[in-house]
Image: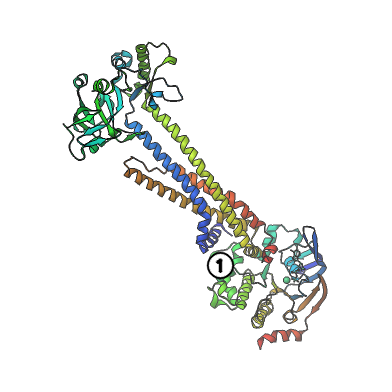
Amino acid sequence: MELHETFKLVSSNLRANPLRSFLTMLGLIIGIGSVVLIVSLGAGAQALIVAQVNSLGSNLVGVLPGASDDKGPPASVFGIQVKTLVNDDVKALLADSRTSHLTAVSGYAQGKAKMVYANQELEGGSFMGVEASYPQIEKITLTGGRFFSPEEDSGLARVAVIGSDVSQELWGGDDPLGKTFKIKRESFRVIGVLQPRGRVGFSNLDKYVLIPLSTAQKILLGWRHLSLIRGRVDEAANIGETIQGMKEVLRDQHNIDTAAEDDFSVRNAADAVELLKTITDAFRFFLAAIAAISLLVGGIGIMNIMLVAVTERYREIGLRKAVGATRRNIQNQFLIETLVITGLGSIIGIAGGAVVSALVTVIARALEYNWEFIVSLPSIFLAVGVGLAIGLAFGFYPARRAAQLDPIVALRYE
Amino acid sequence: MPSLIKVSHLSKQYQNEEVVTPVLHDLSFTIEAGEFVSIMGPSGSGKSTLMHILGFLDHATDGQYMFEDTDVSLLSDDQLAAMRSHKAGFVFQQFNLLPKTSVLQNVMLPLMYVPMSEDERIAKAKQAVEVVGLSHRLDYRSNQLSGGEKQRVAIARALVNDPTIIFADEPTGNLDSKSGAQIMKTLYELNLEQKHTIILVTHETYTAEHAKRILRIRDGVIVADEQVAAERRQAAVAGELK
Ligand SMILES: Nc1ncnc2c1ncn2[C@@H]1O[C@H](COP(=O)(O)OP(=O)(O)O)[C@@H](O)[C@H]1O
Ligand SMILES: [Mg+2]
């Protein structure tokens, strides 16, 4: 029997009992579907995180207080206060020739406080003291008003540039420009409103209020130190050199002789992206491997049903042999039947996984995440390949059993 | 020219685990092309076993089976399949049609394992269906047919690949006497008019006497090998004409 005739026979056999054929495939459909879904969601989440980090600007370099090693970030990342960075460090970085590629540098001092306007309160709001050079470091756009000036910073002015969520929650639809509100019982005047920026990691930038650094340190926090320093490098090619220069300048400032004694850590966005990718890749692989176990279960289910089908069709097999079918004919018939089942199951699984992933995309976008729908061709090829491999592996034994069947036994079988 | 079938000292025993069941003992006989032979004997005497061996479905334990020039015991599995495909056609007591499958598709089944075009298969199958007089049932499913019609479809399936020999194992066993008589008439005419060699297994004298020759077996031994008297044969065939 030629291959296309076997296909015809198999497809009519499968059509004769559609529910059963579908149930046979179900395990595989779920397995393939979850692999495709997980790989797709993983890629979407990774793209989202990377995009967020990149949105900070890839020429950005940051200095965090406290030492870090290759394995992990400094303690300050976890909210532990380390007081080693001070305003003089920023001045030194701006003045030194070793860091001449820095176009702008600012110290940051961050705190949380209740914010009140009239009878509206904002819970979970954060303020960030930054210098007037901030707009040259981070990508921001004002929907109204202006950013504060160096004079306002040094003069302890009580002015604020507010995030879009802050504006929404305290003023609703009203224009907040020129209004006075309270941070920690101190009055601030709104001079600018930011365009929505979205989330980076766990923090919602739109819930931030930007105020002059000196005002934050002296009036709200009572600090002399900084939460972090950020600077912008003129060109990506100069990042490595600049990071080296920054370390040297800061060591001079802090009277440190060797790298081992560093009480600060310098990071750039590109490194962070690389690190994030490594972590998320490992995560994706791990989840996909778990999902792949369900493929194995699906394969065993298919083998089980095929063995039952062989037993049910003893007489048919005996008859086919009696009219001239060879072992190979019978084996091909059952093997192709399994392959068609797994092939169809894979296709349905891929479609199902992609549809669920698309739904997740729609929901994530509705929640204002900039989520991308990614179903990569390699992951589809992989899923189909794995599906067919399972068909071959688990279809071989039942097909062989059918082929080996003694025609007499099969014909006499009741 | 050699005999179509030459069996010498053929024995068969089944072995299941420790139990050995001897079924056929030291059989020797020949059958020529164009013959119509009945194998007769009580139930359990080994008729079906013998027919399966002659039909390349089973192996003898001992002795020799020559078909035309071929020593069948030396054939590989694939060669046996080729013999079943080209030399033999089978009619079984239980019909053994594929369920939920049309008459045409059932009759085409043996042709599926022979290289030829789909059109050719359909043409040959239609021709075979016509020989058994079922052209008006071509598109019926096998389960929509009466017992007699089912067995005629089975005969058409046995004929479709122009086999050298047709084996029929109690073909009337599951039929009422009228349908059974019709089946026997069809087989009789196939032998008479189309010169098909036919081996018929039965335990009924009346059915057996449609053949020219009867091999009687009992407990796996041939107890008689006799020609059917012309008038008895006439009577058997006339039986269904009335
Ligand atoms: N696979 C088998 N294993 C053991 N004994 C068998 C097997 N097949 C048939 N037999 C025995 O062989 C004997 C002959 O069977 P069979 O050829 O079917 O007889 P008949 O067709 O004349 O009724 C019976 O006694 C039967 O029980
Ligand atoms: Mg029998």
A267 above or below A259?
below
From the image, tell me which residue sits under label 1. B120
Please report the residue visible at 42 percent of the width from the left and 48 percent of the height from the top.
A354
Q: Is residue B84 visible?
A: yes
B54 above or below A367?
below
- Residue density around tag 1, few if under 14, some if 14–19, many if 20 or more, within 10 Å: few
The quadrant of the picture occupied by the C terminus of chain A is bottom right
Q: Is residue A366 left or right of residue A320?
A: left
Q: Is residue B63 visible?
A: no
Residue A341, image x, y percentages: 52, 55
Please report the residue visible at 23 percent of the width from the left and 38 percent of the height from the top.
A168
Which of these two is toward me, B142 or A5? B142
Q: Quadrant of residue B236?
A: bottom right
Asked if disc 1 is less than 8 Å from ligand 2, the answer is: no
On what subunit does the disc labeled 1 rest? B
Q: Quadrant of residue A267?
A: top left
